[in-house]
Amino acid sequence: MSLSHLSRRKLPLPPLCRALLTRLLSFSTTTITSSKLHQHYSFKPPHSLSSSPQNPNRIPSANTKKKQKPRYRPPSSLDRTGIKPIKSDLPFDFQYSYTESNPTVRPIGLREPKYSPFGPGRLDREWTGVCAPAVDPKARSVEGADDPKLEEKRRKMRERVQGEPLTGAERRILVEKCQKRNTKTQINLGRDGLTHNMLNDIHNSWKHAEAVRIKCLGVPTVDMRNVCTQLEDKAFGKIIHRHGSFLVLFRGRNYHPKKRPMIPLMLWRPHEPVYPRLIKTTIDGLSIEETKEMRKRGLAVPALTKLAKNGYYGSLVPMVRDAFLCSELVRIDCRGLEKSDYKKIGCKLRDLVPCILVTFEKEQIVVWRGKDYEPVEDGYFLPEREIFDDPVGDLVCSEDSDSLDGTPAAVNRTGDDE
């Protein structure tokens, strides 16, 4: 039985218990200030032992509350506080892809608001949903062809960087340095074609070498003429060697890495706009019944070729042109390819052959030559811009004249081809 219980019942305590109780009570009521600890050791008692303990129900004041550290915020590339927008003097419109976007075909709608892929406040150009034009946004001269002043400015910049043309011996040395056995540096041009950020990769490669090897695969290889033209036009370089899907791009005699152009990078890929439908309900000049019958016959025609995924399609256009000499319908097997890929291939065939698209059903491309078809006399491949002859005779390289099967008409005799 405890002492407090005995005291509540008011029972007589034994003398020994009374003495212990008195000693305990006198010790608990003795104030801590009577101790000499604070005089000799600067001792300060905690609040729990003080004579006037704090009320546990009292709310602590704001001054006594411990301040919390601000939460960690990782640095963001989108945070442009106090930083001026990037200004680039490149004389062309910034697009996600320069080979897979046709400026003559205008979209009929956008899949998202006009959010700039460069990030908010990072670029001094306005994003139109398709491109960031180099002209003044207030002018609104985005529609139609390029500004002739910009084309002239591009030409002068490229001529200033290129300088004197290379000799045959210099060309042979640069091509030899870009072979697989001599360097591992390579830029891959894939299904998206020549993208905007790829220009930055090309200039980064030109820091350490005068020429860079580029491997082209996928949809853009259907129109290699456009790939070579855009590479030279946007990077201000010169293609000095081409064999199949491999290109060697020279930076120029007067190129200086520290004076390279400012290329702002895209932080994300913008959504593709909405374009008109490629396949119409009825083909122009035919009725509904004739269109259905033609699509049925087109799917039954033997396949001209089967396209490999991410392959080289440089000889596809001449193959279709030759097939139209003996058949009005041509079917191309595209099983295994992405739906967007073979639709882009069909769109390129329509413009390059030219032909009429019939259907994309069952992963097939069926094209019709039309009623009034005439074979194209002009060759599809790049015209012969320059033929480089070595005075010694060791190198005869026609970089642009190809045969119909996609192989170069003249190649390097030293065996440097990949």
Image (cartoon, helix red, strand yellow):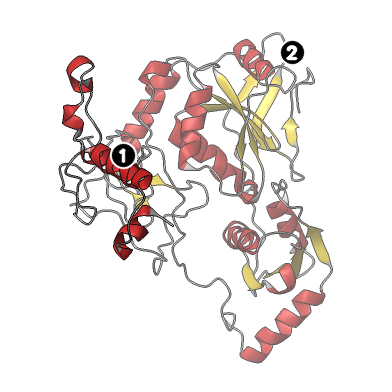
Question: Who's the residue at 34% across and 46% down the image?
Answer: 15
Q: Nearer the viewer, residue 356 or 273?
A: 273
Residue 104 - label? none
Instruction: Give residue 150's position: percent from left, percent from top.
Output: 31, 39
Instruction: Give residue 311's position: percent from left, percent from top.
Output: 73, 47
Residue identifier under label 2: 394
> Can see residue 80?
no
Horizontal side, residue 122 vs residue 181: left or right: left
Residue identifier under label 1: 150
Question: Who's the residue at 49% across and 25% down the image?
Answer: 204
The mark lying in front, picked from 1 and 2, is 1
Q: Residues within 10 Å of mark 1 (few under 14, many from 20)?
A: some
Secondary structure category for the residue under label 1:
helix
Alpha carbon of mark 1 to alpha carbon of mark 2: how far? 40 Å
Q: Indicate which disc, 1 or 2, sits on the residue closer to the N terminus.
A: 1
Position of the N terminus by quadrant: bottom left
Question: Which amino acid type corresponds to the residue marked 2 in the rendered image?
Answer: Asp
Query: In the rendered image, which quarter is residue 162 located in?
Result: top left
Q: Residues within 10 Å of mark 2 (few under 14, many from 20)?
A: some
Instruction: Give residue 52's position: percent from left, percent from top.
Output: 16, 44
Horizontal side, residue 184 vs residue 92: left or right: right
Question: Which amino acid type corresponds to the residue marked 1 in the rendered image?
Answer: Leu
Question: Who's the residue at 56% across and 49% down the image?
Answer: 192
Q: Nearer the viewer, residue 328 or 32?
A: 32
| Pointer 1 with pointer 2, Cβ within 8 A | no
Question: Who's the residue at 31% across and 33% down the image?
Answer: 153
Position of the C terminus by quadrant: top right
Horizontal side, residue 51 vs residue 288: left or right: left
